[in-house]
C-alpha cells in the first residue's frame, strides 16, 4: 500500500470527522443490529421484528427540522461552544439518556414501550447526524469530500463494532439494561472528545440567517424538474437492495442457527473490518477515478453480494461460508457508502449543508425505513432465498440510472 493512499486521511479535520462518525454509528447499530437480535432471541414474530424498521422514521424525516438546526443558535451555550458544538452537546446528552431508557425496557412485557424508546433514540440520533454531516461538508473542500465521507463511514463502522459486537459480547456477562448503560458511557466519552478535546474555529463562525425555506428554495431553483427527478430517483434506488437485505441480515443469521458469538465474530468484528477496507478503497477511488465511475463499480458489487445470502441459506449454518458472505456484503457496502456519501456531499451548497444533506439522505432513508419494514412479511411469504433474490433485483434501477448519468448528466452539471 503506497503512502498516497493514506495521506489524504491524515489531518486533524479528518480525525475529528472520524470520531464524530463513531458517535453517529453507535445508536443506529444499537437499534438495527442489537435491538433486532434482542427481539429475535425473545421469539418476537419475524414480521413484527421487520416492522421495527419503522423506528428509523426520524432519519427519513430529519430534513423537516434541519433548517431550524441550521439557522438558530442555542442561547448561552452558543457563546461558549459555537453554533454546531452547542447543538451537538445538547443532542448527545439527550441521546445518552434515551439509549439507557431503551435498555431498561422489556419487549416481552411491553413491546410498544420498547418501540417508543427506540423511536426516541432514533430521533436524537438523527438530530446528531444533521449536525455532524453539516460540519463535515462545511470544513472540507470538494476534492476532500471523498476522504471525509470515508472517515465518516470508517468511524461509523467502528461504532458498529462497539455497538454490534461489543453489546453481544457484553450480553454474555451482563443483562441487556447493563449493556445499554455501558454503550451509553462510550457515547459520553465520545461527547467529551468532540466538544472539549478537539478545538476548531469552524464552530464559531458567524452564520447567515437565511430563513427556514432558503435551503429548499436554493436546491430546487438550482436544478430543472427533470434533473431533480433523476437525482432523487438515483438516491432512492442506489442502496435500496442493500438496505432491504441488510434489515433482515441479523434475524436471518439467528434463524438459520448461528449463535450470538458467531454473529459477533463474523458480522460485527470481521464484517466491520471488511467494511472499513471497502470504505478506504471507496474514498481512494472517488479521488482517482471520479464519483460516477466509483458509484458504478460499487453499485455492481452491492448487487452481486446480495446473492451470497442465497448461497448461505442453501449451505446452512457453516461458519466459514458465513465469513465469505459477510466479507462480500460488507466490502461492497463500504465501497458504496464512501462514494455515495461523497456524492450527496458535493450536491450540497455549504451555506445550507445541514438541511440539504438531510433532505438528500432522507430520500434514501425512505427506502431504508418504509419500504424495508414489510421485509419480515416478505420472508414469511417467499422464504429467505427468494427474499434475497428480490433484494438483488431492487438494486438494478440505481445502476441503470448511473450509466445514464455518465453519458448525459455528469457530476459537474449537478454540483452548486
Image (spheres, rainbow, N blue to C red):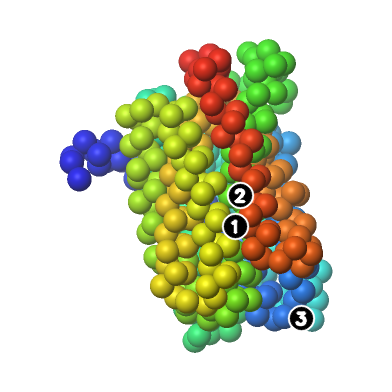
The N terminus lies in which quarter of the figure?
top left
Contact, mark 2 vs mark 1 (Cβ under 8 Å): no
Which percent across, then down, holds residue 182?
51, 73
Q: Residues under labels 2 and 1: Cα distance?
A: 11 Å
Few, some or many C-alpha atoms within 10 Å of disc 2 (few <14, some 14-19, many ≥20)? many
| Residue 96 visible at all | no
Is 240 above or below relative to 95? above
Q: Residues under labels 3 and 2: Cα distance?
A: 34 Å
Is 170 above or below relative to 250? below
In the drawing, does residue 302 fall left or right of residue 324? right
3 vs 2, front mark: 2
- The residue under label 3 is 108
Which percent across, then down, holds residue 327?
42, 59
Contact, mark 3 vs mark 1 (Cβ under 8 Å): no
- The residue under label 1 is 246
2 vs 1, front mark: 2
Q: Check residue 392 in the rendering and tell me which mark sits there, or answer none.
A: 2
Contact, mark 3 vs mark 2 (Cβ under 8 Å): no
Mark with earlier residue (3, 1):
3
Mark with earlier residue (3, 2):
3
Query: Residue at the spot x=59%, y=31% of the render?
Result: 400
Which percent across, then down, holds residue 157?
45, 55
80 and 245: which one is in front? 245
| Residue 295 visible at all | yes
Amino acid at each position: 500500500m503506497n503512502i498516497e493512499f493514506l495521506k489524504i486521511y491524515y489531518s486533524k479535520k479528518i480525525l475529528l470527522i472520524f470520531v464524530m462518525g463513531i458517535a453517529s454509528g453507535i445508536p443506529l447499530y444499537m437499534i438495527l443490529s442489537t435491538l433486532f437480535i434482542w427481539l429475535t432471541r425473545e421469539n418476537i414474530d419475524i414480521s413484527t421484528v421487520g416492522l421495527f424498521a419503522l423506528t428509523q422514521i426520524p432519519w427519513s424525516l430529519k430534513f423537516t427540522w434541519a433548517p431550524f438546526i441550521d439557522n438558530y443558535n442555542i442561547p448561552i451555550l452558543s457563546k461558549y461552544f459555537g453554533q454546531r458544538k452547542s447543538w451537538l452537546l445538547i443532542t448527545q446528552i439527550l441521546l445518552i439518556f434515551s439509549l439507557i431508557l431503551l435498555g431498561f425496557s422489556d419487549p416481552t412485557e411491553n413491546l410498544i414501550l420498547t418501540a417508543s424508546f427506540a423511536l426516541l433514540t432514533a430521533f436524537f440520533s438523527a438530530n446528531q447526524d444533521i449536525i455532524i454531516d453539516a460540519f463535515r461538508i462545511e470544513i472540507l473542500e470538494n476534492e476532500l469530500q471523498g476522504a471525509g465521507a470515508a472517515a465518516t463511514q470508517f468511524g461509523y463502522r467502528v461504532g458498529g463494532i462497539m455497538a454490534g459486537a461489543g453489546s453481544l459480547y457484553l450480553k454474555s456477562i451482563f443483562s441487556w439494561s447493563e449493556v445499554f448503560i455501558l454503550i451509553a458511557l462510550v457515547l459520553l466519552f465520545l461527547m467529551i472528545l468532540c466538544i472539549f478535546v478537539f478545538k476548531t474555529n469552524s464552530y464559531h463562525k458567524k452564520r447567515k440567517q437565511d430563513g427556514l425555506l432558503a435551503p429548499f428554495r436554493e436546491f430546487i431553483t438550482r436544478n430543472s424538474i427533470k434533473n431533480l427527478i433523476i437525482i432523487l430517483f438515483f438516491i432512492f434506488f442506489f442502496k435500496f437492495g442493500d438496505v432491504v437485505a441488510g434489515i433482515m441480515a441479523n434475524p436471518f443469521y439467528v434463524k438459520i442457527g448461528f449463535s450470538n458469538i458467531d454473529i459477533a465474530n463474523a458480522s460485527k468484528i470481521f464484517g466491520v473490518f471488511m467494511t472499513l477496507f471497502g470504505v478506504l478503497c471507496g474514498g481512494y477511488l472517488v479521488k482517482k477515478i471520479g464519483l460516477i465511475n466509483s458509484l458504478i463499480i460499487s453499485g455492481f458489487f452491492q448487487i452481486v453480494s446480495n446473492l451470497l445470502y442465497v448461497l448461505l441459506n442453501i449451505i446452512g449454518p457453516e461458519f466459514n461460508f458465513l465469513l465469505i458472505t459477510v466479507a462480500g456484503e460488507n466490502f461492497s457496502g463500504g465501497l458504496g457508502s464512501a462514494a455515495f456519501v461523497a456524492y450527496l456531499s458535493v450536491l450540497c451548497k455549504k451555506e445550507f449543508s445541514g438541511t440539504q444533506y438531510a433532505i438528500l439522505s432522507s430520500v434514501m432513508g425512505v427506502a431504508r425505513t418504509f419500504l424495508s419494514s414489510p421485509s419480515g412479511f416478505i420472508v414469511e411469504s417467499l422464504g429467505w432465498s427468494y427474499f434475497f433474490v428480490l433484494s438483488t433485483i431492487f438494486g438494478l434501477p440505481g445502476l441503470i440510472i448511473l450509466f445514464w448519468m455518465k453519458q448525459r448528466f455528469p457530476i459537474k452539471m449537478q454540483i452548486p
